[in-house]
Image (spheres, rainbow, N blue to C red):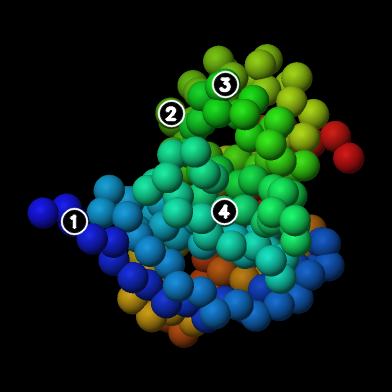
Amino acid sequence: MALKSTIFKAELSVSDMDRPYYGSHTLTIAQHPSENDARMMVRLLAFACEATETMAFSRGLDEPDEPDLWDKTLTGDIAHWVDLGQPDETRLKRAASRADRVTVYTYQSASAREWWKGMAGKASKLRNLTVYNVPSEAVEALAQMAQRAMRLSVTIQDGDIWVSDDDHNVQLTRDVLQRADD
């Protein structure tokens, strides 16, 4: 018998003064049996940082040909493809050809640095690709915030990000490994 996903609910309030974007989202997050709390919370952080009214979680780990998050147009085209981890060159090229924008969030700092050493030259050819690394300390702190029902507030200003709930406050800055050409 296959293991089932664990369902998390999140009320997410986003105040992104850098874009500017201000919105509230009621989210249902399916945590795949192979996904730990840290990865799920980085997925939630990526949602907050890239939020739009139409941003959505895809089937993610259950469907290898889909990103973790995406923003689709009314015609079904992918406007923004958001992946987590350390995708290979083939996946990045496929994403860059299918979407207007591609964003990757790496979150395992030591292995991410090694991955980026091998990937940087190849990724530089993809003009619509942005790659961020979330520092390990922040990932660990975010994982401590994981609860089946969450009320999170995310504030973004001048590249700094604050994530808070009733009991925790996490401040972080994403390391920019590559920024898409605008």
- Which of 87/134 is in front? 87
What residue type is disc 4 on? Leu
- Vertical relation: 30 (above or below) 11: above
- Determine the image quadrant of residue 162: bottom right
- Mark number displayed over residue 164: none
Residue 165 seen in the current view: no
- The x and y percentages for residue 33 are 26, 54
Q: Earlier in the sequence, mark 4 or mark 3?
A: 4
> According to the image, label 4 marks what residue?
69
Alpha carbon distance from label 1 to label 2: 28 Å
What residue type is disc 3 on? Glu
Mark 2 neighbour class, 10 Å CA radius: few under 14, some 14 to 19, many 20 or more: few
Q: Earlier in the sequence, mark 2 or mark 3?
A: 3
Alpha carbon distance from label 2 to label 3: 16 Å
- Mark number displayed over residue 89: 3
In the visual, does 130 lie left or right of 57?
right
Q: Which part of the image, by quadrant, shows the N terminus?
A: bottom left
- Determine the image quadrant of residue 52: bottom right
Mark 3 neighbour class, 10 Å CA radius: few under 14, some 14 to 19, many 20 or more: few
Q: Earlier in the sequence, mark 1 or mark 2?
A: 1
- Determine the image quadrant of residue 178: top right
Alpha carbon distance from label 4 to label 3: 19 Å
For mark 1, give the secondary structure.
Answer: loop
